[in-house]
Amino acid sequence: MTINAQTLYQLLPAVYRNRDSETGETLQAFIQVVAEQIALLEEDLAQLYDDQFIETCADWVVPYIGDLVGYRQLHGVTPQLTSPRAEVANTISLRRAKGTAGALETLARDVTGWDAHVVEMARHLARTQYMNRVRADAPVFPDLRNPEPLARIGGAFDPILHTVEVRNAASGRGWYNIANIVIFLWRLRSYPVTSAPATRLDAQRFLFSAYGMPLALFSMPVPKDPNVLATAAENVGQPLSRLALAAAPDQFYGSDKSVFIQGVAPGALSICNLSDAGGGAWAHMPAAGQVAIDPELGRIAYGTAPAAPPLVTYHYGFSADLGGGTYDRLATFQNLQPVVGVPSPQATVQAALDASTGGGAVEIANSDHYAETIAIHPTATGAVVELRAADQMVPFIALAGDLLISGTDGAEVCLNGLWIAGGRVRIAANDSNKLTRLTLRHCTLTPGISRGADGSPAQPDAPSLVIETGVSLAIENCILGGVRIAPGASVTITNSIVDATRADRVAYAALDGSAAGAPLSISSSTVIGKVHTSQLQLASNSIFIASLASGDGWLAPLWADARSAGCTRFCYAPPGSRIPRAHRCQPVKGSDLAVTQPVFTSLRFGDPGYCQLSQRTGREIRQGADDGSEMGVFQQLQQQQRETNLRVRLDEYLRFGLEATLVYLT
């Protein structure tokens, strides 16, 4: 029951209320104060009642309830663990299912945030059948006429039975034994691209990728049915193979599914290998009226040439929300007015920028291709202009020259969520250019300017970003090629990849590509290529992959002129680097250089595992950041903490006598 001041006042005898009205209602004011305290007491009593239940308790109570049921706190690297209310609530039910594959799978997903599938290897062992009860679903010999199941041998969804292996499961070579449990994990995420134009190679051949190079398509993960314990292949985002797409086109092909070509019916579609056949041709070109897809290369071939490049929907794989991509960036938008849209009301990016020279935002509302050579020039003093992609869109800007940025005194420019190729982003030095600040957020400035059909850089030595003035430059969550910057500028790079396309090319230097560039602060980033800066103000949790070519005139692959100032901490710096004082950096003096160096899944721009540290990398790198996670651009993912969380839970939930092995499929 809620008691308010009016209710309390009416409970008083009428004589006191009459007398109170004659004396200025002093008693009523006192009752109002009492009612406020009663309301606080009621609220506290209600919260105390709510705090008895995990579903309604305050956040600070969750660890105490967890302690009552023996819950062990983990690294808060996923939403479920940042506030572990759900896991505490499920502790009792999970313990009732302790040791089962369903419980282990639920734990693996919750504590790592990755897609996971648990396989009890005892169920995949070939054994002699009892003739009175034949298991028709467990044939020892597979059907060699059906290639799709054969392609899954050795993976998470292997349908084939195996003979017993007695080697250690932890070595990765002895999975199939009675006591072995294998937990398959997918670290890469599947990102959707919706209704984007395909890239035309000629009248009949197209690419899914906007940047004109091979692209491995991924499947779209379908939410798991809560009534089904085990994860199925369609519940995880993984590379989409030709055989899988051909075997189940209805499962993967459609406007709301993994891949789709607008205007192409399933009956006109064929799945085949469109690899190079020599002389610039592709193998297995389709007949007239048919359309072929190669999901492993991201290629499309028409038997009859279409009138225009088709609109395509597909998914690609990557480790994190980095560079231009179809993920949530709404929190990074600047609060600017007015907001001018492209392609409506302005049809071109340049027209929208011309309408926003006094300040404001230009927002590209789709993932279309824009073949423009644009210039950004705020004309009002102190004006701020943001050129951005709409949330979860990734427009592709194909330049025919440099994207020039300039501005009047105090002006600032921000690029957010764009994919740029074909030219450099350049701030030119002239008397009228007084631009103060340039910010790049979640952008991809294609390393090597653009990419050929084979994925090779068109201009491998060309930088992606050229700064000729004393501007303040901030690069956040970006992928870009080399940087050339005047000594009078200042640079801060965070959570980004700077890729000069090869370790002995120049990633960061002055305008001539040799002298010292502006002072640099860099954190949680991966740099491929040589670096020469006047001062390395701070390098933290970063990886520098650099080397000197034969006859190179550089003194060191990572070279700071002023070594008495600045700091390098928790970084990998190549041997021979000339850097400020180092704190817990790798490799340390006397260490084995073959062990203490990063090993990557791929250093090829466009690959799903681009700049992802391989599991073959030493612990010194994989756990070398200041928070115990990996060095480099993917430190933000805290993958070591995720793995630690899983191993802690396995100690508690794995049935006695079983041995668990973690296998990373991506």
Image (cartoon, grey):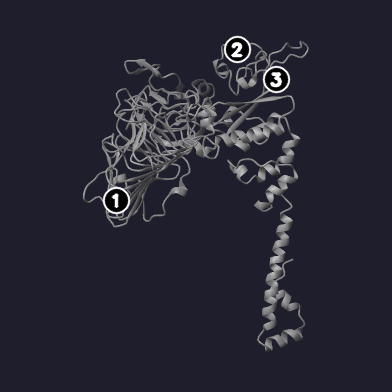
Q: Is 22 placed above or below 383 here? A: below
Residue 74 position by quadrant: top right
Dot 1: few (<14), some (14–19), or many (≥20) neighbours within 10 Å? many
Q: Amino acid at mark 3?
A: Ala
Q: Amino acid at mark 1?
A: Leu
The mark total stands at 3
Q: Seen in the image, is 627 located left or right of residue 297?
A: right
Residue named by callout 3: 122
Which dot, 2 or 3, sits closer to the camera?
Answer: 3
Residue named by callout 2: 143
Q: Is 199 placed above or below 381 here? A: above
Q: State the SS at label 3.
A: helix
Q: How far apart are labels 1 and 2 at the CA level?
A: 68 Å
Q: How far apart are labels 2 and 3 at the CA level?
A: 22 Å
Q: Position of residue 583 (x, y in %)?
A: 48, 38
Residue named by callout 1: 435
User: Nearer the N terminus, badge 3 or badge 1?
Assistant: 3
